[in-house]
Image: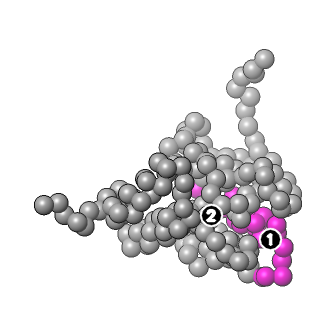
């Protein structure tokens, strides 16, 4: 007889098999019910906490992107109590500020504190209705298909770090090198 309490373990994170089965079925049938994806996000955060792992503001924002909230400011403010990195200290909770200002603050905090700040750019989408600068993600749009942001395995530049500056809240300047030209 098979054990009815099947779990799957990935490193220190343990998931109930029934949850993974529900998610696989939803993805195979081309629909990911918000309840299932919301439950997955919460399970990932809970498992990370139980395993003693820290959760950066950026990771919390990505994991909870598809969760519902009545005030879009809470997409950032709600993550401040969950995040365990320095980024949360760069954001002051003030509900009188615009959503655009709050999302920009979150992007700046990630750029200044995250170990891979340029992954932030893989979360930017073009169909935002907010007046955001081109490098600030709209966290209210829900899940984004961003394979670059999913893992830390992409290191085309080796152990070098991104060289950038933010001269003002509307600009992000990146340093780069011309490798080749495509004609």
What residue do we see at 67% from left, 71% from top?
75
Q: Main secondary structure of the magenta part?
A: helix
Disc 1: CA contacts within 10 A as few (<14), some (14-19) or many (>=20):
many
Q: Is residue 7 left or right of residue 40?
A: left
Percent across and percent down for residue 47 are 41, 69
The C terminus: image quadrant: top right
Disc on res. 182: none
The disc, 1 or 2, on the residue closer to the chain's N-terminal end is 2
Q: Quadrant for residue 177, please give it.
A: top right
- Horizontally, residue 95 falls left or right of residue 112, namely right
Q: Is residue 69 magenta?
A: no
Residue at left offset 84%, top offset 82%: 96
Residue 123 image position (x, y, % from top left): 67, 53
Residues drawn in magenta: 94-115
Dot 2: element:
loop
State the residue position of label 1. Answer: 99
Q: Give the farthest residue toward the top.
A: 183
SS label for mark 1: helix
- Residue 109 drawn in magenta: yes
Residue 46 position (above or below residue 6): below
Give the residue at x 35% y 63%. 18
Most foreground residue, 11 or 38? 38
On the image, numbered disc 2 is attached to which residue? Answer: 65
């Amino acid at each position: 007889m098979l054990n009815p309490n099947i779990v799957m373990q990935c490193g220190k994170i343990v998931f109930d098999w029934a949850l993974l089965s529900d998610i696989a079925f939803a993805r195979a049938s081309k629909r990911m019910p918000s309840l299932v994806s919301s439950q997955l996000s919460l399970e990932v955060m809970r498992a990370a906490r139980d395993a003693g792992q820290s959760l950066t503001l950026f990771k919390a924002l990505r994991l909870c992107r598809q969760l519902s909230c009545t005030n879009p400011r809470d997409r950032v403010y709600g993550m401040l109590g969950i995040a365990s990195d320095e980024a949360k200290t760069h954001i002051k909770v003030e509900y009188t500020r615009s959503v655009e200002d709050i999302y920009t603050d979150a992007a700046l905090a990630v750029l200044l504190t995250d170990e891979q700040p340029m992954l932030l750019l893989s979360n930017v989408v073009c169909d935002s209705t907010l007046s955001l600068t081109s490098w600030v993600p709209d966290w209210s749009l829900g899940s984004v298909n961003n394979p670059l942001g999913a893992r830390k395995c992409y290191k085309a530049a080796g152990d070098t770090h991104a060289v950038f500056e933010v001269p003002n809240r509307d600009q992000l300047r990146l340093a780069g090198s011309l490798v080749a030209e495509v004609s």
